[in-house]
Image (cartoon, rainbow, N blue to C red):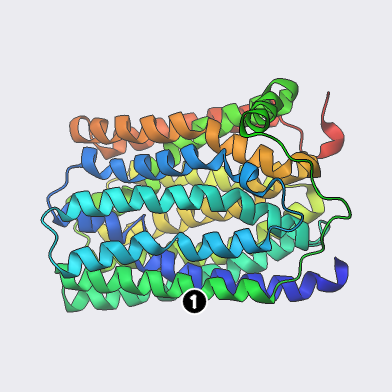
Amino acid sequence: MEKQHGRNTVFLALVESLWGVGMNVVSVGTVIPVFLLKLGATNAVIALLPSLSALGAGSATLFASYLTHRSQGIKGWVLGMHLLAPVPLAVISAGLFWKAASPVALVLSCWGIYYAFLGLLFPMWLDYMARILDPTRRGRAFGVILLVQTLAGAAGVSVAAWLLKLGTGLTVYALLFALSWLASTVGSLFFLGTREALPDEPPDAQSLMQHLGDVLALIRSSRWLQFFVGARCLLRGTYPLIINFYAAYAVAHRGATVAEAALYGAAALIAQAGSGFLLGILGDRSGHRLPTLIGQGALVLACALVLLSLKGPAFFAVAALTGVYLASEFSSQLNWLMDLSPAPNRQAVLSLTGFLLTPAAVLVPLAGGFLMDTIGFPVVAGAVAAIVLVAMAVELAAVPGRPSGIRR
């Protein structure tokens, strides 16, 4: 593994660079919420975006480890799912180009399907990276991959901002979704350059029900996982209320332009790129709990800034802090969970965690969207800050920083 670590890091970075462009040309934090707002959607409707994303991903993720459980190598699965997942983006593009009767319904339904595919893909992808990267250097590798991905993503949102300056009609958005599909599809092909070491023994076959039963039993036998999932439920339900709404709020109430809101994504990605690399280094040296908490603290500061009466340009600071938080999710929180999970159960633990977070990820953004329409976004941001602080306290008190701290 050590000999292939550098090569695999390079090819994974190439994959994620083009996926960074693809996912940020139609940024779920800036471009799509503003698009839905311009189509007349309320905050409650826009809240369906993170809720449908979570429902699609969470309902599918539990089956990811079953699909691959009989495979000695999972490279083919990872490549195939990377090629399949962006197809709904092409469907949205075609529908907008041909002036679909209900563009809001088209975007929301296809976005839910897109995230169902990502829900199957995500645990496979993480498990594959854990298999092909040196565990003692994985945090730094994640940081490098995130750095490349986010810088490319910043270029993606800059392209989106430039196109949106030319116009904000359906045809422009159709082009953005087409570019997203193309970049993601081409980037997926770089998985062909990675190298996977196969295990000596083929895995045992299981029925679907036996597999699901074994996966669900993990939560009963792991006390640390119970607290980890509890804290993650608090975070997974609330952070989309900031990340998916601050740009639309800045446009509607703080004088920001649509193009300026698209550039918030660039600010978030630049902050994400730099902080992700530094948090990865810190995690390799001290364990990944500390950088995870640093990222969550940044989200609390973002909420605090929202509570101030800031003009649109000041929201670049909010964007940057959300970027630090998202960097900690990728470079730190995921590595923390993988470190604590035994290798044979790693993909199952990742799948189970995603599945158990689904109710909070679906229901809390929906409730938050309705509350924004009644009591306003700043009040909701204040509540999010308080909830994140509770989650941080749980993680500090009940979840070990390293595997050596696990009490069976």
Please provide percent x and percent y for residue 79.
59, 65
Bin the neighbour count of mark 1 within 10 Å (Cα to Cα): few under 14, some 14-19, many 20 and up.
some
Residue at the image position 19 percent from the left and 65 percent from the top: 96
Q: Quadrant of the N terminus?
A: bottom right
> Left of 105 or right of it: where is 303?
right
Q: How many marks?
A: 1
When the figure is inspected, residue 161 is found, relative to residue 32, above or below; the finding is below
Answer whether residue 292 is visible to the viewer in this image. Answer: no
Q: Secondary structure at mark 1?
A: helix
Q: Which residue is the site of mark 1? A: 186
Q: Quadrant of the C terminus?
A: top right
Left or right of residue 17: residue 361:
left
| Residue 360, x across and y down, in percent | 44, 30
Residue drawn at (43%, 76%) of the image: 155
* Residue ID at (77%, 47%): 287
Identify which amino acid the numbered label 1 is placed on: Val
Q: Position of residue 100 (x, y in %)?
A: 14, 60
Position of 88 relative to 360 (above/below): below
- The picture places residue 377, in percent across and down from the top left corner, at 27, 39
> Residue 228, relative to residue 20: is it above or below?
above
Between 166 and 87, the residue placed more toward the observer is 87
Is 174 situated left or right of 234 in this image?
left
